[in-house]
Amino acid sequence: MRILVANDDGYLAPGLAALVAACEGFGSIDVVAPEQNASGTSNSLTLNRPLSAYTAANGFRYVNGTPSDCVHLAMTGLLAHRPDLVVSGINNGANMGDDTVYSGTVAAAMEGYLFGVPAIAFSLVEKGWAHLDAAQRVMRDVLAALVPTLKVQPAAAPWLLNVNIPNRADADRLPRRVTRLGRRHASEAVIRQVSPRGDTIYWIGPAGDAREAGEGTDFHACASGAVSITPLQVDLTDHANLATWASRLGRP
Ligand code: MN
């Protein structure tokens, strides 16, 4: 069993070390993570310059690129072997609902999934590493439930899981719920400032609050004190409205 570990907070992030520790004993571990924090970079690949890969003193590899770059490189030549599982995180902050579209943490896992490898994205719901040890135990429990099945029989079709863990001392004793993604309100307004050189600059505002957070969603599970596990797919097709669009726009 070969496990590839990535993240989007960068190779120095405490959450990455916790995820690596959670993987210990389940197989051989390779870490390929971004050199710098690349949160919010989604699935972007760096196409306008070459990438460099380095190895830190602790053996972690890091790449001067995005989370998707890291997993892409690992899948296509950086590593001698293809991994059996890709894990990403644990992210400093939630990745629920619409966050999954922007998240570099989810994207790193998705890159593995797109290459046909089962993958899991882990996120800590509240920022800060206050209860990282408890989150590490949750990640270990999830891996313990999945890795043996992969060892017996590699997944016929890849799967992609998005796991959000409340940042609580008792996280490993919380229920685990399989959920669907909720939705967020639109992001808050951009923040306008004047730079030290007199130019107008803008900060992207914070993500909106949960809008669709009903029973069964990731937001609802975490708010009610559970670990949320959402199985994701990548097909963005609006299947329910295919026929409607065909009648409006199709031409024989
Ligand atoms: Mn991040």
Image: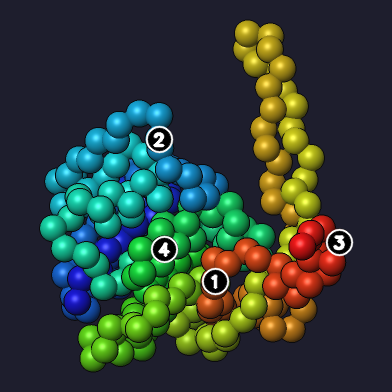
Report helix, strand or loop for mark 1.
Answer: loop
Inspect the image, locate mark 1, and give the three-letter code of the amino acid beneath it: Gln
On the picture, is 247 further left or further right than 221? right
The residue sitting at 68% across, 12% down in the picture is 199
Q: Earlier in the sequence, mark 4 or mark 1?
A: 4
Q: Dot 1, how many residues are within 10 Å of its Cα: few (below 14), some (14-19), or many (20+)? A: few
Which is nearer the eye, 250 or 128?
Answer: 250
Estimate the x, y position of residue 121 in percent, counting from the top left: 45, 66
Inspect the image, locate mark 3, and give the three-letter code of the amino acid beneath it.
Arg
Q: Which residue is mark 4?
A: 114
Residue type highlighted by circle 2: Leu
2 and 1 marks in contact (CB < 8 Å): no
Instruction: Residue at 40% x, 49% y: name it.
Output: 67
1 vs 3, front mark = 3
What's the CA distance linking mark 1 and mark 3?
Answer: 27 Å
Q: Which residue is mark 3?
A: 248
Name the residue: 67% across, 32% down.
203
Identify whether 60 is placed above or below 194: below
Relative to 158, is 178 on the left or the right?
A: right
- Mark 2 is surrounded, within 10 Å at the Cα level, by few (under 14), some (14 to 19) or many (20 or more) other residues, namely few
Is there any visible trace of residue 245 in the rendered image? yes
Q: What's the CA distance linking mark 4 and mark 3?
A: 32 Å
Reading the chain from its start, which is encountered first: label 1 or label 3? 1
Residue 225 visible? The answer is no
Look at mark 2 in the image and give the residue it sits on: 47
* Distance CA(mark 4)–CA(mark 1): 10 Å
Foreground tag (2 vs 3): 3
Q: Earlier in the sequence, mark 4 or mark 2?
A: 2
Q: What's the residue at 20%, 71% (across, down)?
A: 2
Residue 120 in percent (x, y) is at: 42, 71
The residue to which callout 1 is attached is: 233
